[in-house]
Image (cartoon, helix red, strand yellow):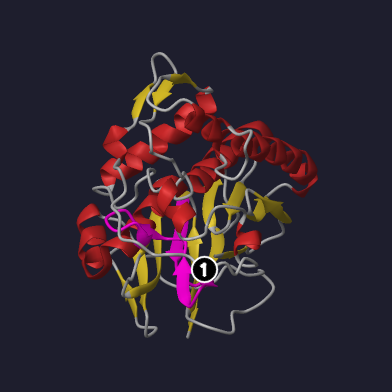
């Protein structure tokens, strides 16, 4: 997902949390200070939620299986968002897929995953299930049963984008857009005409028109937008084509009729949970999203585009 705007703004692009970061503000004079605050925020999220850091709070839960562990308010909030997403999607998005992610080779930063050619053995194994996780917000503790490993990849980046956009808009008093790997949140007064966001199969530079796949540019004035798909994070291991969206019911990369699903919602976290769940739900995703009243754009494997009621009219569309 790529962002552009209709009037003069200022933007910064860099990398954190293993993905691309884009910050756009409507007051160019505040870009540097906002970028410093964003960097600090994302560093705190990484220290709390990373599955790839031995010193993260999330990794520390592995050392205390079955026992209550006191966690920071930040990790408690991230876990609450993940559990809420699991409940809202009927378990299609489940944070207990950590072991399954490791089993398919996604056990380190994605840049390293693609360079690793060790074969993997694919075995059907249902995820333990999100209901096994006991999060007590009153005491600030979480209990994870033995043998269960958590992965917050389906929710943490979008949640971090929501928190960052709201925080920066409040501090800076201007319009703010934060996009983390395409999980986009906006807050504050938007530019004239709203934030123009290009939805596409693979996240790319705002200056480059996509050469492959379909894309559309829409206007967003509030809330969040997210795209989930199998085109951006995929790799090959031992003859297997793999990607990062795991079906909790099988523990294997989902085989979906959709190439990408984009959803607009009140928050980026809600949008990303819905778009990821739609990939897992497959053929029933369009009806499910429609029943929830979520505007969405679904791109089938053959490039056919389907939208649900409320999806914004495209400012530009191409195939």
Over which residues does the magenta segment extend? Answer: 224-252
> Horizontally, is 59 left or right of 171 in the view?
left
**In the image, residue 248 lies in the stretch drawn in magenta:** yes
Q: Residue furthest top?
A: 139
* Quarter holding residue 9: bottom right
Element type at marker 1?
loop
**In the image, residue 253 lies in the stretch drawn in magenta:** no
Pick whichever, 267 or 65, lies toward us: 65
**Residue under pointer 1:** 119
Pick whichever, 178 or 65, lies toward us: 65
Answer above or below: position of 268 versus 237. Answer: above
> Horizontally, is 167 left or right of 274 in the view?
right
Answer above or below: position of 168 versus 141. Answer: below
Residue at the location (57% across, 33% down)?
A: 48
Whether residue 173 can be seen here: no
Residue at the location (45% across, 73% down)?
A: 314
Pick whichever, 244 or 3, lies toward us: 244
Whether residue 284 can be seen here: yes
Pick whichever, 267 or 73, lies toward us: 73
Residue 182, position in %: x, y? Answer: 54, 59
Dividing the image into 4 quarters, which one contains the N terminus?
Answer: bottom right
Residue 220, position in %: x, y? Answer: 49, 57
Residue at the location (35% across, 65% down)?
A: 254
Residue 21, position in %: x, y? Answer: 65, 53
Residue 215, position in %: x, y? Answer: 49, 76
Answer above or below: position of 136 versus 151. Answer: above
> Horizontally, is 179 left or right of 29 in the view?
left
């Amino acid at each position: 997902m790529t962002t552009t705007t209709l009037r003069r703004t200022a933007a910064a692009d860099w990398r954190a949390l293993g993905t691309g970061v884009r910050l756009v503000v409507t007051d160019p004079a505040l870009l540097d200070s906002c970028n410093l605050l964003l960097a600090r925020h994302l560093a705190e999220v990484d220290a709390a939620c990373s599955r790839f850091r031995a010193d993260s709070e999330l990794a520390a839960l592995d050392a205390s299986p079955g026992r209550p562990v006191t966690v920071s308010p930040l990790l408690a909030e991230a876990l609450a968002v993940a559990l809420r997403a699991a409940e809202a999607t009927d378990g299609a998005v489940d944070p207990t897929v950590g072991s399954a992610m490791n089993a398919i080779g996604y056990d380190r930063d994605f840049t390293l995953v693609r360079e690793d050619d060790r074969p993997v053995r694919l075995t059907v194994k249902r995820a333990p299930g999100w209901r096994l996780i006991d999060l007590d917000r009153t005491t600030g503790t979480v209990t994870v049963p033995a043998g269960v490993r958590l992965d917050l990849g389906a929710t943490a980046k979008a949640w971090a984008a929501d928190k960052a956009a709201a925080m920066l808009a409040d501090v800076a008093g201007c319009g703010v857009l934060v996009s983390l790997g395409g999980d986009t949140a906006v807050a504050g007064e938007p530019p004239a005409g709203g934030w123009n966001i290009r939805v596409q199969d693979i996240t790319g530079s705002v200056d480059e028109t996509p050469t492959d796949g379909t894309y559309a540019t829409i206007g967003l004035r509030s809330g969040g937008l997210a795209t989930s798909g199998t085109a951006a994070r995929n790799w090959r291991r031992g003859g297997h084509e793999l990607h990062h969206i795991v079906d909790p019911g099988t523990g294997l990369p989902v085989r979906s009729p959709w190439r990408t699903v984009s959803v607009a919602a009140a928050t980026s976290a809600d949008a990303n949970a819905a778009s990821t769940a739609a990939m897992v739900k497959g053929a029933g995703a369009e009806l499910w999203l429609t029943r929830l009243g979520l505007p969405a754009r679904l791109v089938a494997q053959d490039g056919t585009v389907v939208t649900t009621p409320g999806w914004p009219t495209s400012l530009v569309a191409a195939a």
